[in-house]
Image (tube, rainbow, N blue to C red):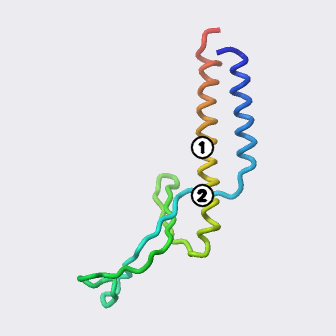
């Protein structure tokens, strides 16, 4: 690769940096709908035949610092949380691209014959 392609890669990093700065609030994870068992032995959810679980309830699941975290989300907050999840996905995509470009730049700067 030549200096022109190196400049192109560095320009792409600057574009990624601008996109990252434009991101708003974010949250990792995904939302799924879950049914629950309350544990009350007299409840319909505990019947041996035809149990009727409670729900569905929206549940957010994500991994943070190597630990799996699950939280129930109030139904009226799902529409507010969903764009934050999308922002986080965009953040991760941009960071992954930045990392790939940095590796390519490293190949040129540190490992190529000059």
Q: Quadrant of residue 81?
A: bottom right
Q: Position of residue 94 (x, y in %)?
A: 63, 42
Q: Position of residue 34 (x, y in %)?
A: 43, 71
Q: Residues within 10 Å of mark 2 (few under 14, many from 20)?
A: some
Earlier in the chain: of badge 2 and badge 1, it is 2
Taking 43 as reference, is 16 left or right?
Answer: right
User: Residue beneath label 2, please?
Assistant: 85
Q: Quadrant of the N terminus?
A: top right
Taking 53 as reference, is 78 left or right?
Answer: right
Callout 1 secondary element:
helix
Give the Cα distance between marks 2 and 1: 12 Å
Q: Position of residue 86 (x, y in %)?
A: 61, 55
Taking the spot 61% from the left edge, 72% from the top edge, the residue there is: 77
Q: Nearer the viewer, residue 49 or 37?
A: 49
Residue 93's disc number: 1
Name of the residue lying farthest toward the top: 114
How many numbered circles does the render carry? 2
15 to 29, vertically: above or below: above
Taking 71 as reference, is 114 left or right?
Answer: right
66 to 93, vertically: above or below: below
């Amino acid at each position: 690769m030549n200096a022109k392609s190196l400049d192109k890669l560095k320009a792409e990093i600057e574009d990624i940096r601008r996109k990252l700065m434009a991101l708003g609030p974010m949250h990792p994870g995904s939302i799924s709908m879950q049914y629950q068992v309350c544990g009350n032995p007299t409840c319909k959810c505990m019947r041996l035949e035809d149990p009727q679980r409670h729900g569905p309830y929206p549940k957010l699941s994500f991994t943070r610092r190597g630990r799996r975290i699950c939280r129930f989300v109030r139904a009226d907050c799902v529409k507010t949380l969903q764009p934050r999840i999308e922002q986080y996905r965009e953040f991760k995509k941009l960071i992954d691209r930045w990392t790939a470009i940095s590796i390519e730049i490293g190949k040129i700067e540190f490992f190529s014959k000059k």
